[in-house]
Image (cartoon, grey):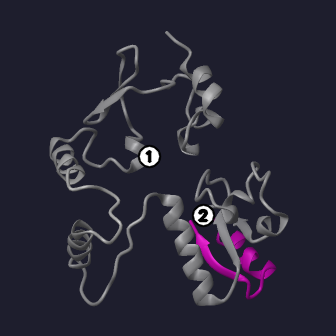
């Protein structure tokens, strides 16, 4: 068996492009690298099959390589991607999604959870006029942006002022949430959990 972890760490900082896919997020018995997936199973380059509980960091709800999804993706690719203006596909998707709800609503699509969470933080700040964000301590990842990374143990490169705008509370501990608010009166724009 090859040591893929060493090879990954030689060319990719942290060994993965997404923090939550790194070696330190999985037990030593987990595969170091994956080569393909189908349904709920994944394979490593040595041909061993694994049941994938994580399913694409919880984003793959239909299973890997679902034929319907694959065919739709290929059709969309042939229409061109990342067009310079809004696409008809975006309009159809937004109308289908907002049609699921009563009343007037809108939708904003994004590329990943970091982008979405940071957008929510910015919206909360704009609405409240406050700067601080309270996040659940021990949660490994909310965003790659400074507002979150600044309060983690990997805060090098984040300006000191940015490190101060996020405070933490303990999961399932309402008293620690109350403490955040009492220690930061009229300063917290959002609680992220």
Q: Which region is colored magenta?
A: 173-193
The reply to whether the magenta stretch includes residue 94 is no
Tell me the element at label 2.
loop
The answer to whether residue 56 is above or below residue 162 is above
Q: Position of residue 52 (x, y in %)?
A: 37, 34
Residue 172: mark: 2
**Residue sitting at 15 percent across and 47 percent down?**
68
Which residue is label 1 attached to? Answer: 57
Identify which residue is drawn at 20% across, 73% down. Answer: 96
Name the foreground residue: 181 vs 141: 141
Q: Earlier in the sequence, mark 2 or mark 1?
A: 1
Q: Quadrant of residue 178?
A: bottom right
From the viewer's side, name the closer residue of 46 and 71.
Answer: 71
| Residue name at image x 25 percent, y 81 percent | 101
Crowding at dot 2, Cα within 10 Å, few <14 / some 14-19 / many 20+, comes out as: few
Image location of residue 45, percent across then percent down: 40, 18
């Amino acid at each position: 068996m090859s040591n893929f972890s060493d090879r990954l760490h030689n060319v990719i900082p942290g060994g993965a492009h997404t923090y939550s896919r790194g070696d330190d997020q999985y037990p030593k018995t987990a595969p170091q690298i994956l080569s393909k997936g189908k349904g709920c199973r994944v394979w490593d380059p040595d041909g061993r099959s694994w049941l994938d509980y994580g399913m694409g960091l919880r984003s793959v709800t239909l299973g890997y390589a679902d034929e319907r999804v694959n065919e739709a993706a290929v059709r969309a690719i042939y229409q061109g991607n990342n067009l310079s203006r809004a696409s008809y596909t975006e309009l159809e998707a937004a109308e289908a999604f907002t049609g699921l709800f009563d009343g007037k609503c809108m939708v904003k699509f994004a590329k990943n959870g970091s982008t979405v969470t940071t957008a929510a933080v910015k919206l909360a700040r704009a609405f409240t006029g406050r700067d601080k964000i309270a996040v659940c301590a021990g949660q490994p990842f909310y965003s790659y942006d400074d507002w979150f990374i600044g309060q983690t143990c990997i805060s090098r490169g984040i300006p000191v002022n940015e490190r101060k705008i996020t405070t933490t509370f303990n999961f399932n501990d309402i008293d620690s949430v109350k403490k955040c608010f009492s220690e930061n009166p009229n300063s917290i724009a959002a609680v992220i959990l």
